[in-house]
Image: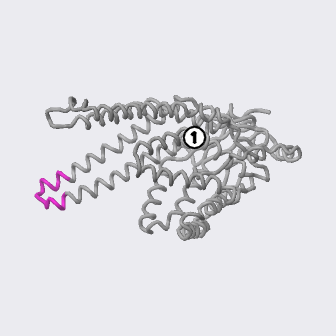
């Protein structure tokens, strides 16, 4: 069998085309998923879920989540066949119960002792890799295409290995914060007070934030790459398993470009805010009116800037991740275009505000459709033969994953 991954181009520029076009061997087929669900269909599910969750004080959440996942899976079609989500609510109850109990314990601990709440957060951080793996195994084992379940083959050891740098980074920041608190309690930070009157504790807080920001900028792209590598290197269907080929350099490039986009969005915001303030001052206008105007302009510019940065980062990350997810006899490519995606986010935001939130399900469907239909899958294997072989031999990897008692859905 040939591997179409070697014939795929690198992650295409989002503005280049409406959808990714893999360059594949003549023997390969290019499949494009379709999202056939509508906002009006999902609105009925969404509004009933909201009402029942409120009426049952949250206890209906597992049933609501099942209905939501069934809708989005059942609305996704590939090669003429729709996906299906086969879980039932009672299978989600253990994970939901654990999450609910953990939330109540943390809420109580926060009122009793800040130190205890920090220890609980640290404990949650330590079990997070295990929870992520359990959730992935649960979700994929109960998602099927043409009657054959998917699976996630990542190990617990691999999950922790991918998260070790994040845990270490969080520990370093926590230690720095602890040292600052100790210094403040020992009255050591008083010596940091400036003649301008800035207290030493404020100085130490600023130092902590700068150190955390610096460490984050240095390590977070690498950590992000490791996590995505763990996730996208262990998807399974029948006897095929995916592989993730992007290295840390691409993630550093993504974060650097996103930072430049953020800077580009910040400069007009500052300039426009200063211009409005200057016009109001020079024009001798009412000071209160000028302040209100500046505030409104600042908020609108901040919202627009955030939407620009978020749309850029999400679209480029989507393309990066899926265009480097490959395997034996298959490869993905994605081309989620930045400008249409930004426009969709802005329209969704405006309509959600105008409708007081009632447009949320329509917005979620529109986003899902654009993301799903931006992906293409190139396969150079006979899918009918592969599925028939898997079903006859009963080698559905998803069945093995579903048998694990500790797999659960936590709404992650």
Residue at which label 1 appears: 127
> Which quadrant: the N terminus?
top right
- Front-most of residues 147 and 270: 147
Residue extending furthest left? Answer: 284
Which SS does the magenta portion mostly show?
helix
Q: Magenta residues, as a range?
A: 277-290
Q: How many marks?
A: 1
Query: Residue sitting at 65 percent across and 44 percent down?
Result: 134
Query: Residue sitting at 46 percent across and 32 percent down?
Result: 169
Residue extending furthest front? Answer: 112
Q: Where is residue 152 shown, x and y percent of the image?
A: 69, 42
- Front-most of residues 229 and 36: 229
Q: Is residue 84 left or right of residue 20?
A: right
Q: Is residue 286 magenta?
A: yes
- Front-most of residues 345 and 220: 220
Q: Where is residue 389 shown, x and y percent of the image?
A: 86, 43
- Front-most of residues 156 and 251: 156
Query: Residue sitting at 70 percent across and 59 percent down?
Result: 88
């Amino acid at each position: 069998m040939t591997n179409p991954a070697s014939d795929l181009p690198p992650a295409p520029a989002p503005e280049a085309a409406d959808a990714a076009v893999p360059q594949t061997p003549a023997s390969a087929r290019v499949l494009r998923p379709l999202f056939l669900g509508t906002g009006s269909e999902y609105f009925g599910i969404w509004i009933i879920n909201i009402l029942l969750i409120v009426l049952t004080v949250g206890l209906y959440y597992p049933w609501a989540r099942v209905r939501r996942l069934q809708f989005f899976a059942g609305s996704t079609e590939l090669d003429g066949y729709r996906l299906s989500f086969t879980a039932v609510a009672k299978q989600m109850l253990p994970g939901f119960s654990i999450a609910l109990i953990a939330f109540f314990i943390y809420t109580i601990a926060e009122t009793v002792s800040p130190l205890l709440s920090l220890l609980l957060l640290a404990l949650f951080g330590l079990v997070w890799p295990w929870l992520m793996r359990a959730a992935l195994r649960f979700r994929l084992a109960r998602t099927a295409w043409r009657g054959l379940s998917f699976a996630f083959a990542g190990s617990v050891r691999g999950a922790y290995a991918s998260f070790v740098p994040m845990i270490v980074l969080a520990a370093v920041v926590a230690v720095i914060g602890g040292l600052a608190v100790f210094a403040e309690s020992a009255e050591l930070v008083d010596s940091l007070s400036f003649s301008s009157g800035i207290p030493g504790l404020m100085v130490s807080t600023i130092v902590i934030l700068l150190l955390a920001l610096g460490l984050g900028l240095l390590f977070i792209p690498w950590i992000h790459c490791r996590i995505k590598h763990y996730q996208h290197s262990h998807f399974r269907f029948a006897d095929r398993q995916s592989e993730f080929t992007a290295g840390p350099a691409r993630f550093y490039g993504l974060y650097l470009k996103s930072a430049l986009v953020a800077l580009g969005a910040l400069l007009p915001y500052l300039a426009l805010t200063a211009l409005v303030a200057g016009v109001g001052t020079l024009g001798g206008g009412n000071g209160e009116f000028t302040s209100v105007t500046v505030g409104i302009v600042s908020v609108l510019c901040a919202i627009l800037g955030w939407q620009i940065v978020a749309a850029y980062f999400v679209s480029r990350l989507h393309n990066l991740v899926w265009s480097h997810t490959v395997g034996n006899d298959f490869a993905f490519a994605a081309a989620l275009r930045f400008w249409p995606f930004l426009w969709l986010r802005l329209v969704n935001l405006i309509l959600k505000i105008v409708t007081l939130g009632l447009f949320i399900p329509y917005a979620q469907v529109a986003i899902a459709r654009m993301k799903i239909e931006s992906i293409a899958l190139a396969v150079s294997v006979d899918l009918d033969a592969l599925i028939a072989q898997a079903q006859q031999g009963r080698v559905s990897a998803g069945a093995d994953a579903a048998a694990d008692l500790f797999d659960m859905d936590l709404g992650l």
